[in-house]
Structures are given as C-alpha cells and as structure tokens.
Amino acid sequence: MINVEEALELVLECARAKTPKTVSLEQALGRVLAEEITSDIDSPPHDKSLVDGYAVLAADAKVTPVELTVNEEVTAGETPSLPVTTGTATRIMTGAPIPAGADAIVMVEQTESVEGQAADVRLAKQQVQGGQHIMRRATSLRRGEVVLSKGALVRPIEIGLLAEVGRPQVSVFPAPNVAVLSTGNELVPAGDAPGAGQIRNSNGPMLGALVQRAGGRHIDLGIGRDDQKSLSQLVGRGLEADVLVLSGGVSAGVLDLVPGVLASLGVAQVFHKVDLKPGKPVWFGVLADPKGDKLVFGLPGNPVSSLVCFELFVRPAMARLAGGSADRLATQSARLTNDHRHRGDRPTYFPARLRPVEGQSQVELLAWKGSADLRTLSSADCLAFFPKGERAYHAGDEIEVILFP
Ligand code: AMP
Ligand code: MG
C-alpha cells in the first residue's frame, strides 16, 4: 500500500493549473495571478506633502519664530501655480504637490496665523529639516517596475495595488469547479427525519463547505443510491466539473460500487487504498480530457475519514488547479498537553485542538469516538500526526500537526 506522501505526489502529478482567464478586479479576489503586473505610474506621481501645513524654504526657518507671507493654498488634486521664494510660504494639504522652490513642510499645528493679517503665518519656535514631511515622486512605485509576480495570491491588498497601477482587469487562474456526490442507500437529506436504518447526509454539506473554503466552486450533486444506474448518471454529471468528490462506496462492502462505476465511465484508477488512518479506502483516478483532465476522489463514507482525506489530498489538488503554490500540507510542530499511548499499524491523523500556551503551540488530543464522530471533530482545528508503531508519548513531547486552514 502506498503512503500519504506517495499518494499526494501522484495526485499533484495529475493536477495542472486551469487555463488563465481575464476577469474584473472584483472577480479576482482569492485567485492566483496568471501574469506579471507592472506599474504604469510613478507613485506618488509628484513630490507630495505628507501633512497639512505650509511649504517653506528650510533656510527661512533657521531662526524661529519667523513670519512668512502666504502665496496661495493648494489642496490634493490641485497643482501649485506660484513658487515658494524667500520670505513666503504656500498653504498645503496632505497629498498635494510641493510648489517649486519649497524644500520642507511645516505642520499646521506648529504654526499660528498672524493677528490682523489673515494671509500671513508665523512658524513657531522649532527646528525645520530640509525635506521634512515631503514624499518624493516614485518613492513607492516606479513606472515600468514589476509590482506583482505571476503566482501571487490576490488578497484585498493586491486588489488595491492592482487598482493603483491601472489594472481593472487581470489574468488569473480560475477557481476549480468541484462536484460533490454523497453515496449510500442509508442517506437522507438534512431536512428529513431519518427512518429505520437511515442517517442524514452530513458529508455532502461538509464537503461542499470545504470546497468553498478552499476557494472552489461547489456543485452539489446530492445523494446517489447504491445502484449502478443511479450512480452512473450522477457521476456522469460530476465528470463535467474539474474535480469530482464522492463520499462512500469505496470500501469492501457488497454495495461499494463506486470504483466499478468510475471504471465503466472511463476514469482510470491511479490508486486505491493508502496507508493511513482514518481514510485507508480512499480512491483516486483521472478521466483524460483535452480541455483539462478530470480528477476524481472517492473518499470513505465516515465523516472523519472524509475530512482527513479532503485535507490530505483534495485541498492540495484544488490549490494546484487554482494556480497556487500552497499545495503542500500546512504542518507545524506542537507539544502534547497530555500523555498519550499510540498503538497503530498505520500512520494516524488524530483530530485535535491547537492552542497557544505562553507563546508555545500546544496540542490537545480530543476524546475521539471513532470515524463517525463529527461532534468531537467540531472542536478540532488540526490533525495530530502519529507515525505507525507503538510508542508512549508524554505531555510536552513535540509532535507534528496539520492545520485546517
Ligand atoms: P461507506 O464508505 O459507504 O462504507 O460508509 C462508511 C460509513 O460512513 C457508514 O457507516 C456510512 O453510513 C457512513 N456514511 C457514508 N456516507 C455518509 C454521509 N454522506 N454522511 C454521513 N455518514 C455517511
Ligand atoms: Mg456506503
């Protein structure tokens, strides 16, 4: 049986970034840039004032207090019409261009108007440094300079930067479409009261939410019955998406029909079963398609197994399709809060809670009652990893954890 690292490698080899698309800034949020962005402007576009105050000659303020004649007033968006010469000043607002001649700005708080002469100003006793409160043209950006690289994630900050450099449209890698199909004769929708032998479909909504959180477009295929015809029809629809995620029907039960149905629809199996707990029966395959291969994940039906397999395999694949480089698992180390005896024939991913204690990450193992225990899982925010074998861990021992983003 292959291990988690080998399985993830196989998944990533099959996952290629989608064809880039030009979208409006509004649609670019959360996407990865498919082009390098250069600036078409200098920023600031002119030497500008960083404060509200007076543009002066620093030499005039060698000895303060001193009185100066005010030439004019310049607000942001205007341009000065008069130079500042010795004995004069220009009233200037934050962001406005510096008048010719001026080499320092004195904050308005350090000035007072001169009684009876509204146009004049007195600079209070202070030191005035040449260049003070002036931001020189192109300090933050130079025209033609690369401001964002291909592969950068577009966050709200990048949206602002793209707007600043005149890019209302940008080329990005589109979000993957991910169809989710829950299989099982026992399943009823969340809105129904389960009858004898039935349970509600919790995986479908959970996986749909995971897809959305991971930046994908969720296509809900609902519940598939465990029969060839019903599954084939729904899987056929699912194969129109970039990724199809199924839950259930991949183990060794008599109604575990998913691998057979996928094979009959031309999906080539890449692996079935991975050395891990929970989630061993996980299935992965690919349907060749000229417009981009379709990735198909058959996750085991137990909700905890489904979640673990989503985090280990589906999320990294989605990141790759979306053009991102964050396609490795987000691991970190943390210290156990309690003693723990681990005995397992497979590497184990144990739902756990991470918390900072005195500047250190500590991980608390939860009283997990098996693979179906979503309730305990709801207080988890990471998976604690234990290699296979038997070992007694002590409180304070460092282990590896995988974060839920
Ligand atoms: P399976 O992988 O189909 O053998 O299912 C394994 C276990 O997970 C069984 O106990 C199923 O009833 C349960 N299960 C399967 N699908 C779901 C689902 N969508 N929501 C909740 N539990 C499920
Ligand atoms: Mg089943």
Image (tube, rainbow, N blue to C red):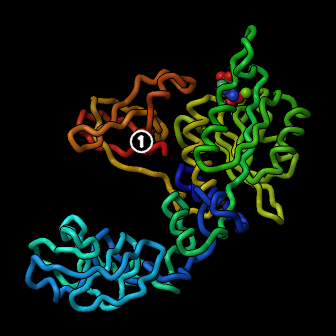
- Identify whether 138 is placed above or below 371: below
Category of crowding for the residue at label 1, using alpha-carbon neighbours closer than 10 angstroms: few (below 14), some (14–19), many (at least 20)? some
Which residue is pictured at 79% across the width and 22% down the height? 185
In depth, the one of 40 and 111 nearer the eye is 111
Q: Residue furthest top?
A: 196
Q: Please tell me in which quarter of the rendered image ligand 2 is found.
A: top right
Amino acid bearing label 1: Phe
Which residue is pictured at 52% across the width and 58% down the height? 155
Q: Position of residue 316 (x, y in %)?
A: 57, 53
- Identify whether 349 is placed above or below 267: above
- Identify whether 11 is placed above or below 310: below
Tell me if I can see residue 66 in this picture: yes
Q: Position of residue 142 (x, y in %)?
A: 46, 84
Judged from the image, the secondary structure of the residue bearing numbered disc 1 is strand
Q: Tell whether 295 sits left or right of 77.
A: right
Q: Quadrant of residue 366?
A: top left
Total labels drawn: 1
Q: Ligand 1 within 8 A of label 1's CB? A: no
Q: Position of residue 98 (x, y in %)?
A: 36, 82
Tell me if I can see residue 10 in this picture: no
Q: Position of residue 102 (x, y in %)?
A: 29, 87
Q: Quadrant of residue 384?
A: top left
Which residue is pictured at 55% across the width and 44% down the height? 311
Q: Residue furthest front?
A: 116
Q: Quadrant of residue 273?
A: top right
Q: Tell whether 147 sits left or right of 285.
A: left
Which residue is pictured at 51% across the width and 22% down the height? 375
In depth, the one of 183 and 206 nearer the eye is 206
Q: Tell whether 50 sits left or right of 228.
A: left
**Residue matched to label 1:** 385
